[in-house]
Image (cartoon, grey):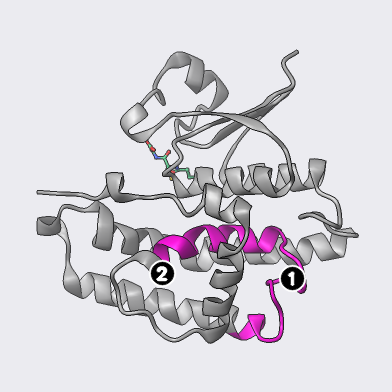
Amino acid sequence: MDQTIKLWGRATSVNVQKVAWVIAELGLTCQRIDAGGEFGGLDDPNYIALNPNRRVPTLVDGAVTLWESNAICRYLVGAYGTPETLGTKNIAEGAQADMWVEWFQNNAYANFIALFYQVVRLPPSQRDPERKTKILDAFSATLNLFDQTLEGHDFISGAKLGLGDIPIGSCLFRYYTMDIPHRSHPNIERYYETLASRRAYRDNVMIDYSSLRGSD
Ligand SMILES: N[C@@H](CCC(=O)N[C@@H](CS)C(=O)NCC(=O)O)C(=O)O
């Protein structure tokens, strides 16, 4: 059986970036196959056989086929992580990191995507400035807890990058490069600079998204 890890998904998808970043942090190699967006292919029967949800990313690692980016990241960290990389020493530490995955997904992600649509993806004629302001206020307020928790730590689980940093970290490049007024979050600003100093983050998350920009 082909043992190369295969990742389907366009490099401009934030959910694909999350997985590609984890793969790079773990020092694994993978073959990424463009799919979704301008590349299409999500309704191809061969793709549906791998991912009946018809979204990206999809990961195939030997006999393991997975979709849903957070589940894929958990799998990769569990299967290949060590306490020196993204892994943890025990289940309790792993659960602490996972808590921040769930927190971001359940409290912040929907507003982040809605904001990205209002600022980037929608054609200007379909944008709604009032809605944008409301979403930005809500997203910024949600970040307060993360900012407070980062006080005195380089990363959300402590001194090293962990699974809990991946979902929020994957969105921060877009957040800080969108033309919006950013509320002051000194710890998150420092954290974003730390992430941007990592090669794996720069190569997989800091990806030009101008091809996603909507126009009339
Ligand atoms: N909850 C899913 C969301 C997957 C998703 O919605 N992916 C988007 C890209 S970020 C997609 O497939 N869009 C269709 C496309 O790119 O053609 C995950 O985290 O993997």
Please determine whether, in this image, residue 17 is positioned above or below residue 149: above
Residue assigned mark 2: 176
Q: Amino acid at mark 1?
A: Ser
22 horizontally vs 122: left or right = right
Pick the residue in front: 141 or 87.
87
Q: Is residue 162 visible?
A: yes
Q: Which residue in the protein does label 1 denote?
A: 157
Q: Amino acid at mark 2?
A: Tyr
Residue 112 x/y as whole percent? 41, 63
Question: Does any portion of residue 109 appear in the rendered image?
Answer: no
Q: Nearer the viewer, mark 1 or mark 2?
A: 2
Q: Is residue 216 left or right of residue 20?
A: left
Find the magenta span and give its range: 148-176
Ligand 1 positioned in quadrant = top left
Of 129 and 209, nearer the camera is: 209
Determine the image quadrant of residue 113.
bottom left
Instruction: Identify the element where label 2 is drawn.
Output: helix
- Find residue 152 and report its image quarter: bottom right
Seen in the image, is 140 located left or right of residue 4?
A: left
Determine if the magenta segment contains residue 162: yes
